[in-house]
Image (cartoon, rainbow, N blue to C red):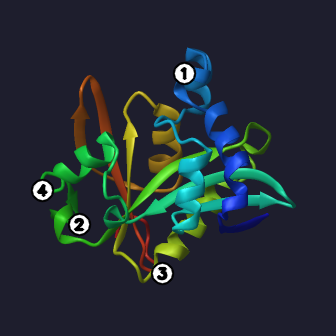
Amino acid sequence: MDYRNAVAADAPAMAELFAANDYDALTEQERAKQGFVQGGLDADTLRSMAENGSLLVADDDGCLAGLLGLASSEDMPSPPPPVQALLDAQDSLEWQGRPLRSASFLLYGPVVVAAAYRGKGVARGLFTAALQAASGRADVMVAFIELANQASWSVHVDGFGMVPLGEFTLGDRAYGVVGASTRPGATPGT
């Protein structure tokens, strides 16, 4: 498996993968079992994200096994509503006993793994690649996970050791915010 930066040519496959795992494309049982993504990232948006270096992919000899977003909020002139809500909550979210606002951070996510590759270490490989890509650029990678998405919470908190930083709400949706240290050799929450 090759973990690399996405390129513009990956956009159609990334859009297909994203659409197949969108909340509205899945049954309630599928969402509970595998998790879901939201946000309507189409091929043009994903192409733009790839061109500005804010996507990583897992490439299995030309087959897209997964994708992961890793971006600075400064790269988003008009952040989507959940990102803006996270940015607005920075003073109430804590990283290592301090408000998140006092730390340099990159936004981690969305993460999507193709059905044929689930349970084979692709999400962990993308997480590790993101840690390496973020090292030296930020102190922490920060993700927001809709609390209804227990599969994602389990992978990131229970599996990868990301540390809860707090919560925020947007409309009728509640989100948990988690973080992982980008310092080489550090455990995710230190």
Residue 91: mark? 4
Give the mark nearest the N terminus, 1 or 3: 1
Q: Quadrant of the C terminus?
A: bottom left
- Nearest the viewer among 125 and 171 is 171
Give the mark nearest the N terminus, 2 or 3: 2
Q: According to the image, label 1 marks what residue?
A: 24
Give the mark nearest the N terminus, 2 or 1: 1
Residue kind at label 2, given as amino acid type: Gln
Residue kind at label 4, given as amino acid type: Asp
Residue 102 lies, in percent from the top left, at 17, 70
The Cα atoms of the two marked residues, 4 and 3, are separated by 26 Å
Mark 3 crowd level (few <14, some 14–19, many ≥20, 10 Å Cα): few
The residue positioned 24% from the left and 71% from the top of the image is 103
The Cα atoms of the two marked residues, 4 and 1, are separated by 32 Å
Say if residue 30 shows up in the picture: yes
Mark 1 crowd level (few <14, some 14–19, many ≥20, 10 Å Cα): few
Q: Residue furthest top?
A: 28
Q: According to the image, label 3 marks what residue?
A: 184
Residue 96: mark? 2
Mark 2 crowd level (few <14, some 14–19, many ≥20, 10 Å Cα): few
- Nearest the viewer among 112 and 6 is 6
Give the mark nearest the N terminus, 4 or 1: 1
Work out whether 136 lies above or below 40.
below
The Cα atoms of the two marked residues, 2 and 3, are separated by 17 Å
Q: Secondary structure at mark 3?
A: loop
The Cα atoms of the two marked residues, 1 and 3, are separated by 38 Å
Cβ–Cβ under 8 Å for marks 1 and 3: no
